[in-house]
Amino acid sequence: MPDPLSPKLTAAAGFNPYTQQYSGPVYALSCLLLEQGARAEQAAIATFVALHPLWLKGSLSGDGAAAAAYRECIRQCAMLTHDRSRYASALLNWDDHVASALWYGIQLPLPDISQILECSIPELKAQLRGIREQMAAAHSALPAVHRPSAG
């Protein structure tokens, strides 16, 4: 069986522009979720390997193409993290870590994140507010650092 992602086959199927458009953001998201370079690269590659058959069937088009890339990246990262809490921030659960990475990390607009996570915008806003509150509470719990005054 030929390599499904060989340059010749992907060019013939028109898959190259799709991978070029989303490979940077997908890799950035995988880095944010996994916090490890080698695993992040593995997740990004696995994302496009998984999406290639969908592309060939014509299932990836329009606005859904971006959401599919991010959703598959999240799925690949979750599969690579047997203990998700080990990779995610100690303060956030996996779902909050994903939402935080999409909003604060790669700075996608709320409607895009809502589509990727398949939740309503009000639900997403409530989740992000909860994340901010958790982070603020954790920050305020840190011991104050004494700095000598200038002068």
Image (cartoon, rainbow, N blue to C red):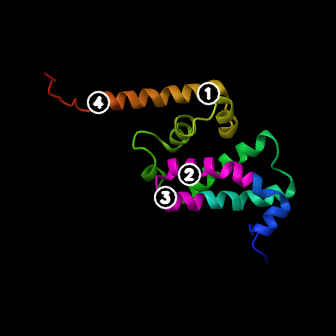
Expressed as whole percent of the image width and height from the top left, the position of residue 135 reads 40, 31
Q: In this view, does 151 lie above or below 47?
A: above
Q: Residues within 10 Å of mark 2 (few under 14, many from 20)?
A: many
Magenta segment boundaries in residue numbering: 18-43
**Nearer-N-terminus badge (1/3):** 3
Badge 1 vs badge 3, beta-carbon distance below 8 Å? no
**Nearer-N-terminus badge (2/4):** 2
Q: Quadrant of residue 141?
A: top left
> Label 1, label 2: how many angstroms apart (C-alpha)?
24 Å
Identify residue type, mark 4. Ala
Identify residue type, mark 3. Gly
Expressed as whole percent of the image width and height from the top left, the position of residue 14 reads 83, 57
Q: How crowded is mark 3: few (under 14 residues within 10 Å), some or many (20 or more)?
A: some
Task: Indicate which label's residue lies in the foreground, 1 or 2.
Answer: 2
Q: Is residue 38 above or below residue 119?
A: below
Identify the residue at image location x=49%, y=52%. 84
Identify the residue at image location x=31%, y=27%. 140
Magenta span includes 115: no
Badge 2 vs badge 4, beta-carbon distance below 8 Å? no
Which residue is identified by label 3? 37
Describe the element under mark 3 as helix, strand or loop: helix
Badge 2 vs badge 3, beta-carbon distance below 8 Å? no
Which residue is identified by label 4? 141
Which residue is identified by label 1? 123
Identify residue type, mark 1. Glu
**Nearer-N-terminus badge (1/4):** 1
- Of the numbered discs in the image, which one, if any, rests on residue 30? 2
> Label 3, label 4: how many angstroms apart (C-alpha)?
30 Å
**Nearer-N-terminus badge (2/3):** 2
Task: Indicate which label's residue lies in the foreground, 1 or 3.
Answer: 3
Expressed as whole percent of the image width and height from the top left, the position of residue 143 reads 23, 32
Badge 3 vs badge 4, beta-carbon distance below 8 Å? no
